[in-house]
Amino acid sequence: THFTHAISRRPGQSVTGGLRAEDRGAPDHVRMLAAHDNYIATLRATGAEVTLLDPLEDYPDALFVEDTALCLPEGAIMMRPGAPSRMGEVAHMRPTLAGLFADLRDITGPGHIEGGDILYTGREVLVGKSARTDAEGVAELRKILDEWGHSLRELQTPDGVLHFKTDCSLLDPETILSTRLLDSEGCFDGYRVLHLPEGEEAAANAIRFNDVVLLPDGFPKTAEMLTREGYDIRPIDNTDCALLDGGMSCLSLRL
Ligand code: CIR
């Protein structure tokens, strides 16, 4: 949970055409930029250096940089998104990571894997297979992690949930915030699990970043629970990212 650096990408005008499981309207680009500013300022306020990349108009979902790579202490691994419209984002992220990591690997395929399906807890790497992440992609990741001495546990992202981390976040090395749905699969045995209060499942995608927890705004019961548990929460407007099934973790790579 200690990070010196984060990488984010500004949303372009084309974000209005981003992927979504269900159409509840297009996001508002201007309001999204304001929320994004606040997100970046919150990361910077913890003392971390944030690299802010320019929008990629050809890739409406490119602000969700988390899906393009996995950053670990030993090195970084470029992902291979399962969404065809997102594949090209990886090449745009690669040079930035090449400047930060001596050991940079690639998932070459034929499998697919997206960063949103990967939760690194410090003691292991949890990966949920999903509509975006398949067994071949997980197997290729496992080979690299074996070399680096990380254990990988292959799990299943619930049906109808975009990514594994849509439904959970790491709050500290021992504690996971999870929906009851995801936790009911037993994936978090050995951790302390805090369940999202009923009706606030959409707050599951939070991030612990240094001494704060960035939490989507508008989930008072979750905010109250986390405050009571001693976390220093920073509510961030997620209205527009939520229309594209995105949350706090998607908007940065943290290292
Ligand atoms: C997508 O469907 O790929 C984007 N609209 C949302 C990606 C969210 N990323 C994440 O959860 N890591």
Image: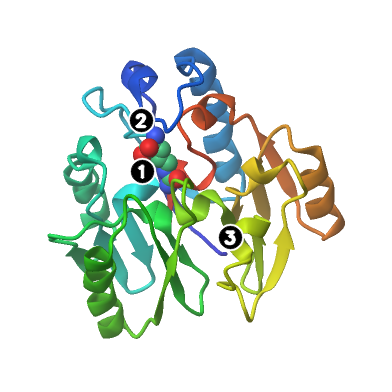
Q: Could you tell whether 37 is left or right of 14 in the image? A: right
Q: Secondary structure at mark 2?
A: loop
Q: Assign the N terminus to one quadrant of the image.
A: bottom right
Q: Which residue is mark 2?
A: 19
The answer to which of 13 and 200 lies nearer the viewer is 200
The answer to which of 54 and 25 lies nearer the viewer is 25
- 3 or 2: tag closer to the N-terminus: 2
Q: Could you tell whether 251 is left or right of 149 in the image? A: right
Q: Is mark 3 within 8 Å of ligand 1?
A: no
Q: What amino acid is labelled 2 in the image?
A: Leu
**Residue at 73 percent of width and 62 percent of height:** 194
Query: Foreground mark, 3 or 1?
Result: 3
- 3 or 1: tag closer to the N-terminus: 1
Give the vertical position of 235 relative to 95 (above or below): above
Q: Is mark 2 within 8 Å of ligand 1?
A: yes
**Residue at 59 percent of width and 31 percent of height:** 238
Give the vertical position of 143 relative to 202 (above or below): below
The Cα atoms of the two marked residues, 3 and 1, are separated by 23 Å
Label 3: how many residues lie within 10 Å, few (<14), some (14-19) or many (20+)?
A: many
Mark number, residue 65: 1
Percent across and percent down for residue 215 are: 66, 43
Q: Secondary structure at mark 1?
A: helix
The Cα atoms of the two marked residues, 1 and 2, are separated by 14 Å
Q: Which residue is mark 3?
A: 182
Percent across and percent down for residue 209 are: 58, 54
